[in-house]
Image (tube, coloured by chain):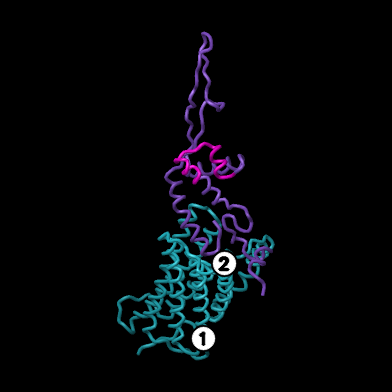
Chain colours: A purple, B cyan
Amino acid sequence: MVKVENLESRGVIGGSFDEDRGESSRRSRVSILRDILRTINNKGGRAKPTHILYGANLSYDRLKKHLEYLEAEGFVKKNKVEGKSKSYVKGKTEIKIESKTENGGQTYYEITKKGLEFLSGYNKMKKFFDAFGFSV
Amino acid sequence: MPSVSIGIELASEPFLIPIWFYSYSFLVYAISALISALVAYFAYKFFKMTKTKSSLMLVFSFLFLTAAYSTLSFTSLYTYLYKPYFQVNFNLGSLSFVNSVGLSLYYITSMIAYVALFVMYLPEIKELKKLFKREIKSKLSVLYVPLWYQSLMDFHLVSILILAYVALRNVANFYKKRDVNSFLVMSAFILIVSSHAALLFLEFDPTIYIAANTLLVAGFSSLLIMLIRVSSGGKSRKSRK
């Protein structure tokens, strides 16, 4: 009898049976989106791209692509917060140091109501598709 | 006890199914249609979140199953309430006309649903997909459509073949995941295949009709239990390891 595992590893069956980090060791797009949203949510509902990048374990290019999708679908909202400028006096001149970013503000991503709904519905959705043998 | 011959003859001589069987089958088909609609609704809700092809195919196939079982439910009710037996004041046409239209609709919609399920469970191998697309474009459409109309037997045979593959994929899924939800889905498909298989033996004993309907409603109930478990958010326990 041929074992199921063997068939899967040979790609005969189980093309859509991989879990989040199943036999292919690659995350599905939906689980990446969940990781991004979860990172933002864990940071109090608002996170900087760098924090999301580390939290979701993504490269900058991939993160940018996924954030664009999430923003377009209304799962996250992009916000810019004016960076705190530091100033000090050197001699008679006051020197102001603007925020780190080149356009003078820090970009944050905020999770929306739809994004929170996605997070709470994700487990149900995963169970539903798992039951049918599909990955999400 | 009044009885009617079924829409399409299976044997050389038509055999009779007691009329009360149709009240039972009306309930069975109505429940099956309702559960199919629920599965389609869940799949649609999740499709909106994921935009994946598999969730869309699931919506598509269960919507067609809803249509198929609603049609059967209606024809069963019509047969049960048909004027010569119960003097109900509505008449859409002769019993054989309503049954033949209803059954034809059922064959078409359920076959679309089964083929959609079959495609969904095809392995993700490009060559296989290409081959299947070529087949469906050329041979399958020519081969199977006329078969549906030949006899009830062929329809059930084709349904069994398709659903057996789907059930097999779900058996593999259960052996991989070993959780209750996958067990319920696997059982559902096995029971639905069994109901089609039972109908092949209708020729020998009309009471098999009741057994087949019971298998069908058991299959859909299994899907309903899975839906309840998923929507209640209960932790899915591993059945055994």
Residue B153, position as x, y percentages in the image? 54, 81
The N terminus of chain B sits in image quarter: bottom left
What's the mark number on residue A77?
none
Q: Would residue A27 be found to the left or right of residue A76 on screen?
A: right
Cβ atoms at labels 2 and 1 below 8 Å apart: no
Dot 1 crowding, Cα within 10 Å, few <14, some 14–19, many 20+? some
> Is residue B144 at least partly visible in the picture?
yes
Which residue is identified by label 2? B173
Dot 2 crowding, Cα within 10 Å, few <14, some 14–19, many 20+? many
Residue A90 to residue B195: above or below: above
Which residue is identified by label 1? B201
Taking the spot 39% from the left edge, 76% from the top edge, the residue there is B26
Residue B69 to residue A41: above or below: below
Identity, as a three-letter code, of the amino acid under mark 1? Phe
The C terminus of chain B sits in image quarter: bottom right
Report in which chain the residue with disc 1 lies: B
Q: Nearer the viewer, residue B28 or B226?
A: B226
Q: Secondary structure at mark 2?
A: helix
Query: Which numbered disc, 2 or 1, marks the residue closer to the eye?
Result: 2
The reply to the same-chain question for discs 2 and 1 is yes
Q: Secondary structure at mark 1?
A: loop
Q: Magenta span covers which residues? A: A37-57
* Upstream in sequence: badge 2 or badge 1: 2
Q: Nearer the viewer, residue B12 or B196?
A: B196
Residue B110 to residue A95: above or below: below
A46 part of magenta stretch? yes
Residue B3, position as x, y percentages in the image? 39, 87
